[in-house]
Amino acid sequence: MYEFDEVQRQYNVLVFGLEKKGLLAPPEPLRLRNFSIFFEKYGTARRFNEFDGVLVFQGVFERFELKNSYMESYLTHTYDADELDKRKKEAALLLGQGGFLCFLLTDPFIDHEKGRDYKGTDLAKYHLNYPHLYRENFQKRIAHVTHKVDEFKRFLEIYGAASSYFKYHNDSIDLRVVAEVQSASVGLVIDRLEYFIPSLVPDNTPEALKEYFELLVDALISCHNKLHQQLPDWITSFKFSEEAGLMGERSMLEDKIAGINSKLQEFDQYKAVLCHSGPELVADVCRIFEVGLGIIVDPVDDFREDIKLLDQDGNVICVCEVKGINRGIKRENINQTDSHRERSGFDNKFPALLIANTNIKSARSIQEKEQEIAAEQVVHAVRMNILMMRTIDLLSLLKLVLAGKKSREDAVDLLVSNVGWLHVKGDELHVLSGD
């Protein structure tokens, strides 16, 4: 048997949100010969993809609480959707660069409760949501766990314990069993990068935490190195007949994925108009006009919030004021738009548009961005011959154009031919006068 030289490397591994399990993180990283373990609190600005591997305890993104009423006991559930979504993205980047994720399974899974679905409210659950991969709970925690991968033998002997087990009927998943209870699979590694390890919560002492994480990370890195052992370059010179076709197909798929990612990034750039203010907001609005709606923009002005919309011949067809404000549109915002028009040398009948990103600080959802413009402000805008739009209206108009429900010509006509409030929600589009 041939032996390949094993390349030694230094791994930087993150333990995330240890305090969510009631554990006090060591004040300094744990540093060993071939890895260092860093501890960061839940909500840290450090990103998963800054490390070579990340360890997360099951359940840190959600909370269940048993409540008692007069008639019955019931569970309440909350979860941190914003933090979870952020870490999903970072986890995808980490896996994409060949890093590993390890979830410590310490509790039964609660996926459903009285018709409510909780299958996606924690990062461990999210990464287990494969078709035909099922998770079920034992009636009680089982302390004796049998290792199926030698690297995890020492860790599981001391800290292995299982509250749940897995059933899988999906041959398309690269799934390997790490640990069993009798014949039930309780520990897995999926796609050679995602580890699910059944475990006790260690004692909250410096000695116990040091032993726990050093044993675990040593096992993870040893297993990871074995699963990702590099073959020598000369081996690749031997080719199977299907390889050329498969590599060509892979290249086409990679190009397609790159195109999809580029388009998704473009959509995200459009959506930024809902949260930015100042010069960033002006840039977001200009991007929607130019890239999304095909309207030429002249952003060069003495005032950063002033832009002009041009026709194909370079003639000004509308002056536009862009505002980021913490509440709703006020009279002064409308008057500033009129002053912009006058400053630009146009009379009060020339088309003028006020685009405002409203409720910047208070909004925490799309619904909160939908707060209406006060009727008296709509009346004043009509009186001043000005059209108002919230950025949510502009984004919704763009959505209609991109879906082919409105033409770009329709969009331009709406912007230069109306006054009041151009209110767009879903497929509904109305010009309101405040009457």
Image: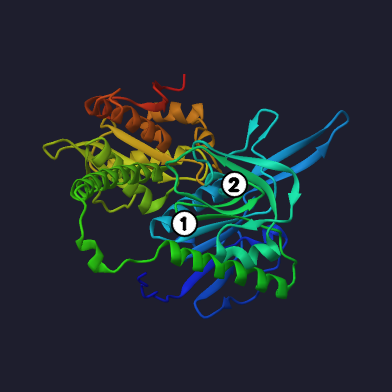
331 sits left or right of 346 in the view:
right
363 sits left or right of 247 in the view:
right
In the figure, residue 172 lies in which quadrant? top left
- What residue appears at the point 35 percent right and 71 percent down from the top-left corner? 2
What colour-coding does the image apply? rainbow
Q: Check the image and name the residue furthest to the front.
A: 1
- What residue appears at the point 33 percent right and 27 percent down from the top-left corner? 400
The image shows residue 308 at horizontal and vertical percentages of 25, 42
Q: Which mark is first along the chain, 2 or 1?
A: 2
Kind of element beneath mark 1: loop
The image shows residue 177 at horizontal and vertical percentages of 55, 52
Residue position marked by numbered label 1 in the rendering? 193
Q: Check the image and name the residue furthest to the top.
A: 435
In the figure, residue 239 lies in which quadrant? bottom left
- What residue appears at the point 74 percent right and 55 percent down from the top-left corner? 143
Kind of element beneath mark 2: loop
Residue nearest the viewer, comparing 401 with 69: 69
Residue nearest the viewer, comparing 33 with 274: 33
Residue nearest the viewer, comparing 326 with 233: 233
Residue nearest the viewer, comparing 251 with 311: 251
94 sits left or right of 31 in the view:
left
Q: Check the image and name the residue furthest to the right.
A: 70
- Number of numbered discs on residues: 2
Q: Check the image and name the residue furthest to the left.
A: 313
The image shows residue 282 at horizontal and vertical percentages of 34, 48
Residue position marked by numbered label 2 in the rendering? 122
Can you say whether 425 is above or below 148 in the image? above
Can you say whether 36 is above or below 230 in the image? below
Q: Is residue 275 visible?
A: yes
- What residue appears at the point 72 percent right and 64 percent down from the top-left corner? 202
Asked whether disc 1 touches disc 2, contact meaning CB atoms under 8 Å apart, the reply is: no
